[in-house]
Image (cartoon, helix red, strand yellow):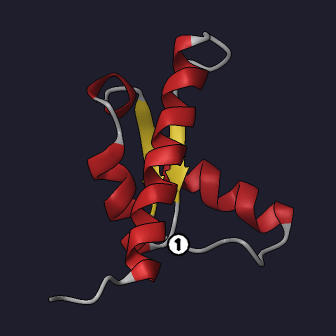
Amino acid sequence: MEMTDWHEFEEKRFARQVAAAAERLLRSEHATSLIVVAPPRTLAELRSAFHADVRCRIVGELDKDLTKHPVAEIEKHLRDAV
């Protein structure tokens, strides 16, 4: 019997939750497009979890972990991503 990788399990669950939240946001018409920012491995999980309606409204992607960066630097990365 193979051992469950709980970290990987939680990463996939998190990606599904983010994908569902993005879909709700776009369907509520509070947003018309998205820029997706996540570390490379998480970004890959998100890509596979996004519904086609979400994927077609993604205007940029950034495969970086910006959680510890100052807001001004994050804004610059976002401008460069589109």
Q: Is residue 64 left or right of residue 47?
A: right
Residue lying at 39% horizontally and 53% vertically, measured from the top left: 46
The spot of residue 16 in percent (x, y) is 43, 47
Compare residues 26 and 59 and report the one nearer the observer: 26
Q: Inspect the image, locate mark 1, and give the three-letter code of the amino acid beneath it.
A: Lys
Residue lying at 74% horizontally and 55% vertically, measured from the top left: 75
Q: Is 47 located above or below residue 69 in the figure?
A: above
- Considering the numbered disc 1 on the image, is that residue within a helix, a strand or a loop? loop
Count up the numbered dots.
Answer: 1
- Residue pointed to by mark 1: 64
Compare residues 5 and 43 and report the one nearer the observer: 5
Residue 82 showing in the rendered view: no
Q: Is 19 located above or below residue 72 in the figure?
A: above
Residue 53 showing in the rendered view: yes
Compare residues 62 and 25 and report the one nearer the observer: 25
Question: What is the residue that sits farthest to the front in this orientation?
Answer: 1
Compare residues 51 and 60 and report the one nearer the observer: 51
The spot of residue 23 in percent (x, y) is 48, 26
Q: Is residue 80 left or right of residue 52?
A: right
Residue lying at 52% horizontally and 13% vertically, measured from the top left: 27
Quarter placement of the N terminus? bottom left
Question: Is disc 1 surrounded by few (<14), some (14 to 19) or many (20+) residues within 10 Å?
Answer: some
Residue lying at 84% horizontally and 71% vertically, measured from the top left: 70
The spot of residue 65 in percent (x, y) is 59, 74
Corner quadrant of residue 28: top right
